[in-house]
Amino acid sequence: QVQVVESGGGLVQAGGSLRLSCAASGSIFSINAMGWYRQAPGKQRELVAGITSGGITNYADSVKGRFTIFSDNAKKMVYLQMNSLKPEDTAVYFCNVHVAVVANFWNNYWGQGTQVTVSS
């Protein structure tokens, strides 16, 4: 089984910064990609940023230039550095990992989420 645990959320003023961390553990044979999603009240979950095992990144247009995703595959960790935070960034942030527990058997696993609140 694979466990995914996020940390680093909290309350911050607009313009401030936070760094989220995500640790994947368990019987992981290989990592394909990791990413961060968020869900605000009354809205659908959306992709914030993703990174492949090869280091290719992609970002939602709303966070480009403000957020940076990076990972440490050896440690099975992924991070989201969030700068210049805005009140509209307020949401529960979820970590997602796309991994194989055995060769060529891929699946997605989710963390429980961490709350990020940006005050104006």
Image (cartoon, helix red, strand yellow):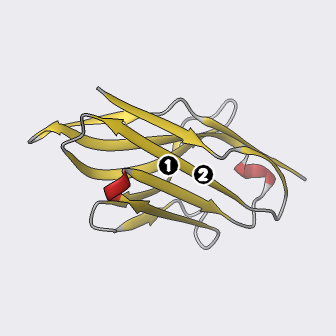
Asked which secondary structure carries label 2, the reply is strand
Tell me what residue is drawn at x 30 percent, y 43 percent.
98
Residue placed at 63% from the left, 37% from the top?
Answer: 114
Image mark for residue 49:
none
Q: Where, by quadrant of the figure, is residue 11 drawn?
A: top right
| Residue at the image point whose x is 55% and y is 50% from the top | 21
Above/below status of 58 relative to 23? below
Q: Does residue 120 appear to the left or right of 32 in the view shown?
A: right
| Rendered view: 54 above or below 91 | below
Q: Classify mark 2: residues with Cα within 10 Å, few (<14), some (14-19) or many (20+).
A: many
Image coordinates for residue 7, horizontal then vertical, percent: 60, 42
Q: Residue at x 52, y 56 (%)?
A: 79
Taking 18 as reference, is 62 left or right? left
Please tell me how crowded label 1 is: few (under 14), some (14-19), or many (20+) other residues with Cα within 10 Å.
Answer: many
Q: Nearer the viewer, mark 2 or mark 1?
A: 2
Residue 107 higher or lower than 75, as above or below: above
Residue 76, horizontal then vertical, whole percent = 36, 50
Q: Residue furthest right?
A: 120
Residue 48 vs residue 114, the one in the foreground: 114
User: Which amino acid does the dot numbered 2 rest on?
Assistant: Leu
Circle 1 is placed at which residue position?
A: 36
Q: Position of residue 91 (x, y in %)?
A: 68, 40
Q: Secondary structure at mark 1?
A: strand
What residue does disc 2 label?
20
Disc nearer the start of the sequence (2/1): 2
Pointers 2 and 1 in contact (C-beta within 8 Å):
yes
For the image, the number of numbered tags is 2
Q: Is residue 77 above or below residue 84?
A: above
As shown in the figure, which amino acid type bears the numbered disc 1?
A: Trp
- What is the CA distance from the residue labelled 2 to the residue labelled 1? 9 Å
